Image (cartoon, rainbow, N blue to C red):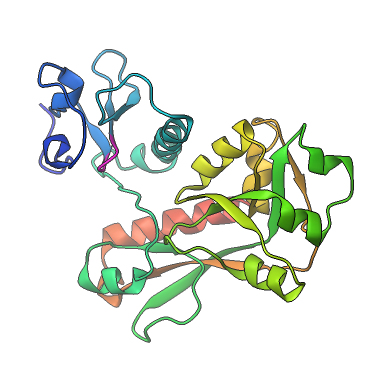
Amino acid sequence: MRDRSSWPVPHSRTVPDVNVDTGCELCEATPFTEWFHSDEMCWIAECDSCAVPMVVWREHDATPSAEVRADLHAKLTVVMESLDTWFLPASRSTLQFLPNRADDAEVLRTGTIDLAIGVYRELPPEMHRAPLFRDSFVVLMRNDHELLQRPLTAASYGAATHIQVAPRGRPGGVIDTRLRALGHTRHIAHAVPYFQTALELTSTTHHVLTISKRLAGRYAERLGLKAVELPFDSPRYLVEMIWHPRHDADPAHIWLRQGFTEAAAALD
C-alpha cells in the first residue's frame, strides 16, 4: 500500500463554474494512484492501467479548445520531463511546479513555496540566490510564416501578432521597452504562463514568439518552427534560483538546489 499522505487533494467540486458529471469517475477525481500535479484546471496522475502519467481536464467536456489542449499538454510535459530528473532518485518525493508570481520573495518568506527560479533584479536582502545560466532571446515562427520571406525589421516585428510568456501575469518587459525606444509597439494576442503552452500555440497559429534561445534550440525543429534573431539589440539575462535562508541547511532543499544546478550545468 502506498503512502497517500503527501498526495495533492483533488478539489474539482470546489472549483467555480466547472462542468462536472457526478457519474464520471474522472470528474470524481478520487486519488487511488500516485498524483503528480493538481490545480484548478486539471490534475495529473498515474494511469491505473499502464502506470503512465495522464492529464485530466476538470471540465466534463470532450472538446477543449486549442489553447486549453496546449496548456494541458504543457503541464503534462513538465511532469514527464521532471520524472526523469527528480522522481527516479527520490521516488518518495513529489515536486509541484507553479507559475512565477510578482511576489516570489514574499511567498518564499511565508513558506508557501520552497524555491523560485526566474529572472530577478532587486530582492529583499535576506533572500539567498544562486545563478543557473545566462540566455538571450530569439524569435520563433512557423516554417511557412510570411515574415520569413524577407529580413526581419523592427517595424515588421512590431506589426506581427505575438504570443508572450508572462509567468508572473504581467504584460510587457525588456523587449517592449526596447521596441518603444525604436518607435514601435507590438500586439500581444496571447499571454500565457507556460513556455510549453506558448510553443504549442506558435506551432498551430501564425503568431510569433520571442523566447529563450536555449528553448528554441530544443523545440523548434520538432514543432516545425524557425528561429531568427531579433532585429534589434537585446541584453542577455541571468536565470537564478532564490530561496529563504531557513532552508540553507535542510537536506531535502540542498538536494533540490543541487539538482537544478546540475541540470543547468548540463545545458552547456
Q: Quadrant of residue 41?
A: top left
Determine if residue 32 is in view. no
Query: Residue at coordinates 23% horizontally, 41% vertically from top-left?
Result: 92
Residue 54 x %, y % = 33, 25
Q: Quadrant of residue 216?
A: top right
Q: Is residue 268 left or right of residue 60?
A: right
Q: Quadrant of residue 176?
A: bottom right
Query: Residue at coordinates 49% horizontally, 59% vertically from top-left?
Result: 261
In front here: 238 or 72?
72
In front here: 81 or 38?
38
Count of numbered circles on the image: 0
Q: Residue furthest right?
A: 150
Question: Taken as a whole, is the magenta stretch helix, strand or loop?
Answer: loop
Write down the region rendered in magenta.
Answer: 38-42
Residue 136 x %, y % = 68, 61
On screen, residue 36 above or below 64? below
Q: Is residue 139 left or right of residue 33?
A: right
Residue 22 x %, y % = 10, 21
Query: Residue at coordinates 30% horizontally, 20% vertically from top-left?
Result: 51
Residue 21 x %, y % = 15, 21
Q: Which part of the image, by quadrant, shows the N terminus?
A: top left
In front here: 36 or 91?
36
Q: Is residue 210 left or right of residue 157?
A: left
In front here: 177 or 224?
177
On screen, residue 246 above or below 74? below
Determine if residue 211 is in view. yes
| Residue 224 falls within the magenta-colored stretch | no
Q: Residue furthest top?
A: 49
On screen, residue 175 above or below 38? below
On screen, residue 69 above or below 123? above
